[in-house]
Amino acid sequence: MPKYFRNFVHKFTTAMLNLMMISPVGVLVTVVILALLVSLIIMLRISSKMADSNARLIDRVTSLEQSTQQQEPSDLQQEPSDVSQEQPATVLQNGLPTDMTNDELYHWFDGRMDALRLFCQPDIDLKTTAQTLGLTQRSILQMLKTTDCNLTFTEYITGKRLAYACRLLQDKPHWNIDAVAREAGIQSDATFRRLFRKHYGMSPSEYRERRIHSDFVTH
């Protein structure tokens, strides 16, 4: 309780006691006034406690807000990214834009494979292809899986070799099947025939005959 208020209460109480000594009416008035004074003191104490409680609550809310603001940057850093399905997860090393989509990268990749005919190399592998084209192995695998072709690297190379073999069968009618297979990068004649039939539903010889006959009829 403030000092000035205690002094006031002391002086007021002394005055009331003097009033009580004067007359019975003074006693009644003194009792009423004292009752009001006690009620006022109680209200002041309650108000003081509520003010302290509100102050502590405000401090707690402020502390929580500051803590949340400090945690926000780390939360943003931990937020998972879903753009891997749209863009290749790699930093290209050959001057290509890093924001190319997988479809755009595949178009470029397939064109370079045709231009260099890397698939015709019997021992071509993922590592050599990545180093030659300036890509990462991961970017090639992801590109082949997320585009419409949805192939493994081995399946892609096999498809390119068989497609090239089809061109040779038509453009080089004097070449035997074994020569076509080797030129396309498949060293085993038996393996070439098995893969060709599985992919096209016919043997290389049957394919050549049909293409030659089709060209003859067309012309």
Image (cartoon, grey):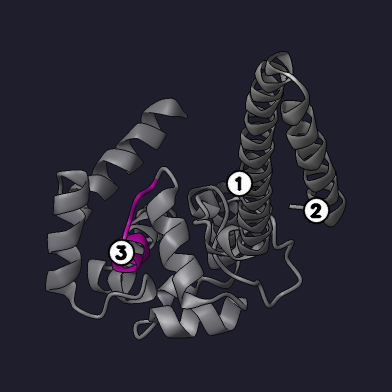
The location of residue 61, given as percent across then percent down, is 63, 49
**Vertical position of residue 63 compared to residue 127: above or below:** above
- Are the residues tagged 1 and 2 within 8 Å (C-beta)? no
Q: Residue 53: which numbered mark, if any?
A: 1
Please tell me which residue lies in front, 195 or 131: 131
Q: What residue sits right under mark 3 in the picture?
A: 158
Crowding at label 2, few (<14), some or many (≥20) Cα neighbours within 10 Å?
Answer: few
Name the residue: 65% across, 72% down.
92
Query: Which range of residues does the magenta coloring cover?
Result: 149-157
Residue 204 falls left or right of residue 180: left
Asked if residue 95 lies in the magenta stretch, the reply is no
Residue wearing tag 2: 2
> What is the residue that sits farthest to the right in this orientation?
4
Mark 3 belongs to which amino acid?
Thr
Task: Give the foreground label among 2 and 3.
Answer: 2
Residue 87 in percent (x, y) is at 57, 53
Three-letter code for the amino acid on which mark 2 is drawn? Pro
